[in-house]
Image: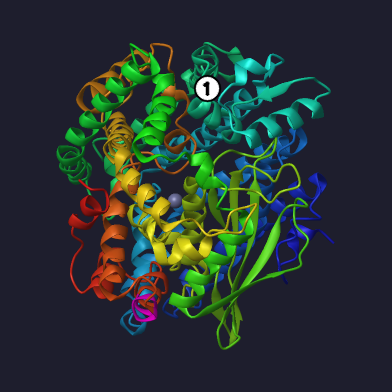
């Protein structure tokens, strides 16, 4: 029995072997093709098309493939190996090819059009009608309306893009993993927190080396930039980090040619579809609707944020010069000087805060929030997974009914993709009276426990955890009964609403005092220290927003500009930086070649979504500020109007149903002291 073909329970993360992958994917792809042939063959019958003869069988076949492929992609991301990568890439081609072919299959397209026009259509639920309309839109964006010759070209473009995007991510991962700096002279590490030192020593020992091993993975790289007093050391790591996957490193990992080719292909795709540029294609299914609307929105945020950022950086420069002897503030000094200024102005360090957030307290606190406001119960249950550190939790209604389950993979380790994300393992559906409850995977790259103590989280890691858990809740708390109208098809620029909404709780004393306990004494975070954290929170807001604006504007303009060579990409980035940025970066910085969001995932011409959704999330949270932070009434409303409805109606409608009015930008500025 091939475990990838077993859909009876939880995904088979623990017993998939390389040799299972090819046969399972071949079989499931063939199954989808047979199903679509059968759906299309009914076109000749006199019976009008119906939900049950078109949508249901197609989605059922696709779901089996998505579930199996989801397991393979997840394993490829979290326990990468050369063999797995090879199998992943070989099968990625088949899956991408199938998806691209389906989205332009004229027989299937005709069935959906007929279904849209059939007498039964008005009797379908609004969620079902919306799904059919979305499918028709996606057929158009997938090339279904193209002439035969153009369809073939469109298909080739999609396949090449998918392969390039996978390679882009591999290059970043390989270049990141490749770097190691073994330090034997302890004085070079002055300023580094003891737990970071401990972890670095353990990593060196694991390689059979003396001293300390520094890497470009978050738990090593970020503290070096923030705490190491040796500017030379910071610069060495900064340079290695910002030149990853560029022509300044190993040529086989150079993402430069991939970026140029991707921009060409995206432009060609847009023109085939009759759009002026790729940004227009990307914005069509989004809430913002047009690149102009998104750019206009970004400039509105910039007008408010940039003066704050300029003030932030001027204060930082003065401080660095006067107190740290850093005359010209360099890019690799920013985090270090910020941390020192924060310490001097607010008299705390992130490392001090971290001692109050041991893993168990943080989880208890986070679950308490979710249990209280949404009326749920969460507990850990035993399960086999892909690594010994992975845990499984189930969420139940307070009444006992199973709502959903999630895996949690917390710690950074080699061969695991960086960053934090939530992914779908199983979607919710109700079929023939049987409910399939959803399953999510939450992946983070936090520091693992060292020295026999529990893992300690920085406040920013705590916030990341709440963020990913918010994505998880969006998947797990949906009420929709059909595949395709849950979290997965929510407009991309509204998808960060639940995740960013959850982050707000990390700044509420009611939550934090129950969620903190000093690792040695168990004492909660002192309220007075929390007040100082709150004052410090807005200290960076201007610089933070300016950075996000820079990425978002660069992304939108890049995908409006048409094909560009690398020199033109750099020139465009320089222009954006001239308009937005408040400090310079060295010439060797090759940031675009590591911008996986837009070159290796679905954020192309969509990075602005983070800010767009933040307006929604800040405004949504302001209802909790009005009704009480732990208000179960506000929670139930959020659950039923936003999380529960998924994509069964437009995000704008859901927001209005929840908030009683359209979104306003004020709460975002207010929350950030701008
Ligand atoms: Zn997110």
**Which residue sits at x=21%, y=30%?**
311
Quarter in which the C terminus is drawn: top left
**Which residue sits at x=61%, y=86%?**
400
Q: Dot 1, how many residues are within 10 Å of its Cα: few (below 14), some (14-19), or many (20+)? A: many
Above or below: residue 537 compared with residue 276: below
Q: Main secondary structure of the magenta part?
A: helix
Q: Quadrant of residue 89?
A: top right
Q: Position of residue 635 (x, y in %)?
A: 38, 75
Q: Secondary structure at mark 1?
A: helix
Residue 591 appears left or right of 10: left
Q: Position of residue 29 (x, y in %)?
A: 64, 54
**Which residue sits at x=44%, y=20%?**
332
Residue 7 appears left or right of 629: right
Q: Is mark 1 within 8 Å of ligand 1?
A: no
Residue marked by disc 1: 241
Q: Quadrant of residue 275?
A: top left
Counting every numbered tag in the picture gives: 1
Does the magenta segment cover residue 270? no
Q: Nearer the viewer, residue 116 or 337?
A: 337
Q: Position of residue 347 (x, y in %)?
A: 40, 39
Residue 459 appears left or right of 542: right
Q: Is residue 226 visible?
A: yes
Q: Nearer the viewer, residue 104 or 465?
A: 465
Above or below: residue 135 compared with residue 564: below
Quarter in which the N terminus is drawn: bottom right
Q: Quadrant of residue 24?
A: bottom right
**Which residue sits at x=38%, y=72%?**
115
Above or below: residue 498 compared with residue 228: below
Q: Is residue 168 visible?
A: no
Q: Position of residue 392 (x, y in %)?
A: 68, 64
User: Which residues fall within the magenta stretch?
Assistant: 632-637
């Amino acid at each position: 029995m091939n475990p990838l073909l077993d859909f009876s329970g939880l995904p088979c993360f623990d017993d998939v072997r390389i040799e299972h992958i090819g046969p399972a994917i071949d079989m499931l792809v063939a199954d989808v093709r047979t199903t679509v042939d059968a759906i299309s063959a009914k076109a000749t019958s006199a019976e009008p098309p119906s939900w049950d003869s078109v949508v249901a069988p197609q989605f059922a076949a696709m779901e089996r493939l998505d579930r199996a492929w989801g397991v393979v992609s997840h394993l490829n991301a979290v326990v990468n190996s050369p063999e797995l990568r090879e199998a992943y890439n070989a099968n990625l081609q088949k899956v991408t090819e199938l998806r691209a072919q389906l989205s332009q299959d004229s027989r299937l397209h005709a069935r959906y059009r007929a279904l849209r026009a059939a007498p039964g259509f008005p009797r379908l639920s609004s969620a079902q009608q919306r799904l059919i309309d979305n499918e028709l839109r996606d057929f158009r964006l997938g090339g279904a309306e193209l002439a035969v010759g153009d369809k073939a070209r469109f298909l080739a473009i999609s396949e090449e893009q998918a392969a390039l995007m996978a390679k882009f991510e591999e290059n970043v991962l390989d270049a990141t993993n490749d770097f190691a700096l073994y330090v034997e002279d302890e004085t070079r590490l002055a300023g580094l927190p003891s737990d970071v030192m401990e972890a670095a020593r353990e990593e060196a020992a694991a390689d059979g080396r003396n001293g300390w091993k520094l890497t470009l993975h978050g738990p090593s790289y970020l503290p070096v930039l923030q705490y190491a007093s040796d500017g030379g050391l910071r610069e060495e790591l900064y340079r290695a980090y910002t030149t990853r996957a560029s022509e300044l490193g190993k040529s086989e990992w150079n993402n430069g040619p991939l970026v140029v080719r991707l921009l060409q292909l995206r432009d060609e795709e847009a023109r085939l579809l009759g759009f002026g540029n790729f940004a227009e294609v990307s914005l069509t299914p989004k809430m913002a609707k047009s690149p102009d609307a998104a750019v206009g929105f970004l400039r509105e945020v910039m007008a408010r944020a940039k003066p704050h950022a300029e003030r932030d950086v001027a204060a930082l420069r003065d401080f660095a010069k006067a107190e740290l002897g850093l005359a010209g503030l360099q890019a690799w000094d920013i985090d270090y000087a910020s941390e020192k200024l924060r310490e001097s102005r607010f008299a705390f360090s992130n490392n001090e805060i971290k001692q109050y957030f041991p893993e168990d307290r943080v989880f208890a606190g986070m679950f308490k929030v979710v249990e209280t406001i949404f009326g749920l119960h969460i507990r850990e249950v035993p399960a086999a997974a892909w690594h010994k550190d992975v845990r499984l939790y189930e969420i139940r209604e307070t009444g006992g009914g199973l709502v959903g389950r999630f895996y949690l993979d917390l710690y950074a380790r080699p061969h695991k993709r960086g960053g934090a994300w939530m992914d779908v393992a199983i979607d919710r559906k109700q079929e023939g009276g049987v409910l399939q409850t959803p399953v999510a995977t939450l992946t983070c790259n936090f520091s693992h426990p060292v020295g026999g103590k529990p893992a300690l989280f920085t406040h920013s890691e705590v916030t990341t955890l709440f963020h990913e858990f918010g994505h998880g809740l969006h998947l797990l708390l949906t009420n929709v009964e059909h595949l395709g109208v849950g979290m997965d098809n929510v407009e991309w620029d509204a998808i960060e609403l639940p995740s960013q909404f959850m982050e707000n709780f990390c700044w509420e004393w009611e939550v934090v005092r129950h969620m903190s306990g000093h690792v040695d004494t168990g004492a909660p975070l002192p309220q007075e220290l929390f007040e100082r954290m709150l004052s410090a929170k807005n200290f960076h807001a201007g610089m933070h927003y300016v950075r996000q604006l820079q990425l978002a504007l660069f992304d939108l303009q890049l995908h409006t500009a048409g094909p560009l060579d690398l020199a033109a990409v750099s020139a465009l980035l320089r222009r954006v930086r001239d308009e937005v940025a408040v400090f310079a970066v060295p010439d060797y910085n090759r940031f675009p070649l590591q911008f996986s969001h837009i070159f290796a995932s679905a954020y192309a011409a969509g990075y602005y979504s983070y800010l767009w959704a933040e307006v929604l999330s800040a405004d949504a949270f302001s209802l909790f500020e009005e009704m009480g932070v732990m208000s179960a009434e506000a929670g139930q409303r959020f659950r039923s109007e936003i999380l529960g409805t998924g994509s069964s109606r437009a995000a704008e409608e859901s927001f209005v149903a929840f908030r009683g009015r359209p979104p306003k930008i004020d709460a975002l500025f207010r929350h950030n002291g701008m």
